[in-house]
Image (cartoon, helix red, strand yellow):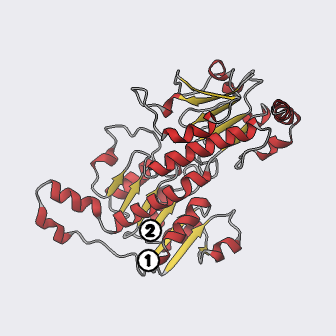
Amino acid sequence: MSFNIGFTRDFLTDDGRLVFNESALGILNDEPGVHHEFVMDFRKEMSPDQIAEYDAVITYLPNWTRKSLEGLDRLTVIARFGVGYDMVDVEACTENDVILAITPDGVRRPMAEGALALVLAVAKEIFPKSQVLREGRWMEHKFIYGSSLTGKTLGTIGLGSIGADLMRLLEPFELERRLAHDPFCPAERAQELSVELVELDTLLSESDFVCINCMLNDETRGLIGERELGLMKDTAYLINTARGPIVNQRAITEALLTKRIRGAALDVFEVEPLPVDDPLLELDNVILLPHAVGWTEEALRDNARLDCEAALSVYRGEAPAHVINREVLERPGLQAKLARYRERQG
């Protein structure tokens, strides 16, 4: 019996072209006992009938609910393309002896660079300067003033893999202070990065740039609302490249409309795609991107390769490198699955 890997349909364009570089599949082609294919029926929520014959599924957009995993004896790993896993029911994975793996090494630098690019874009007022040119108002650029990062304070909500890499990239800009709010970050890690760990309210009130780099979960959903935005300087910028629901979208829209804060850059939204009639689209003090600031050739290549490596680890009867639900590794059902794969290796 071959080891079957399924890729969800969203890795293909409408005309059937592969989104990422095909070289990422090379490591699968080198394994004679491995078969891979695309799950051609795209559904917003995965269904057991789609994945019953797969040992591993590499996935990006679909939701994985408790119902998705009902009655699946063969599935052993869900390899998520990227680091976010708010679309996956982690508890249901564990209870069904399914590993949930992610690819932090594939997104860390592309996302940190993307966040830095947006910090620089809002600081230099790139969007309004571009707008006056496009609208034939060239000379009005004289009244649009950008600012330098030197001497400013930048705060990150979340000092994990991406937040830490952003802080490393910021070192040459001679910021006066670099702040972080992260209840789970060891003090030693912050010290190594020359970052001050502070309470959320302190970060919001003292930062010139607030970057969101945390996971979406029950604690962070709606973390930034009207009260929190009210703590920010009226000259400050908010940059969200994490998940849309971390920021209350009505509140950020109002804050931008009333100039409560100077501006924002948003790569993510409460509802995606962003509706074409959303009031954010009418504002000139916000940069809007389609959840794509980290969508680079390198990110696509590396995430795909790392997901394939995660699947092959299971094929060899081993745990992947980055497992979210590590408690599943101790479950007899999962151990039995991995043992069967090891036996096939001979």
- Above/below status of 279 relative to 192: above
Name which quarter of the figure residue 146 lies in: bottom left
Q: Which residue is mark 2?
A: 209
Quadrant where the C terminus is found in the figure: top right
The residue depicted at 48 percent of the width and 81 percent of the height is 176
How packed mark 1 is, by other alpha carbons closer than 10 Å (few <14, some 14-19, many 20 or more), is few
Q: Is residue 274 left or right of residue 106?
A: left
- Tell which of 189 and 169 is nearer to you: 169
Quadrant where the N terminus is found in the figure: top right
Q: Amino acid at mark 2?
A: Phe
- Tell which of 247 and 254 is nearer to you: 247
Q: Is residue 301 left or right of residue 144?
A: right
Which x, y percent locates residue 58? 61, 35
Which x, y percent locates residue 342? 83, 35
- Above/below status of 149 relative to 293: below
Name which quarter of the figure residue 255 lies in: bottom left
Q: Label for residue 173?
A: 1
Mark 1 or mark 2: which comes first in sequence? Answer: 1
Badge 1 element: helix
- Tell which of 247 and 21 is nearer to you: 21
Q: Can residue 85 be spotted in the picture? A: no
Q: Amino acid at mark 1?
A: Phe
The residue depicted at 41 percent of the width and 54 percent of the height is 252
- Tell which of 56 and 222 is nearer to you: 56
Which x, y percent locates residue 153? 47, 75
Which x, y percent locates residue 140? 14, 66
**Count of number-bearing discs:** 2
Q: Is residue 135 left or right of residue 110?
A: left
The reply to whether callout 1 and callout 2 are in contact (CB within 8 Å) is no
Q: Is residue 165 left or right of residue 134?
A: right
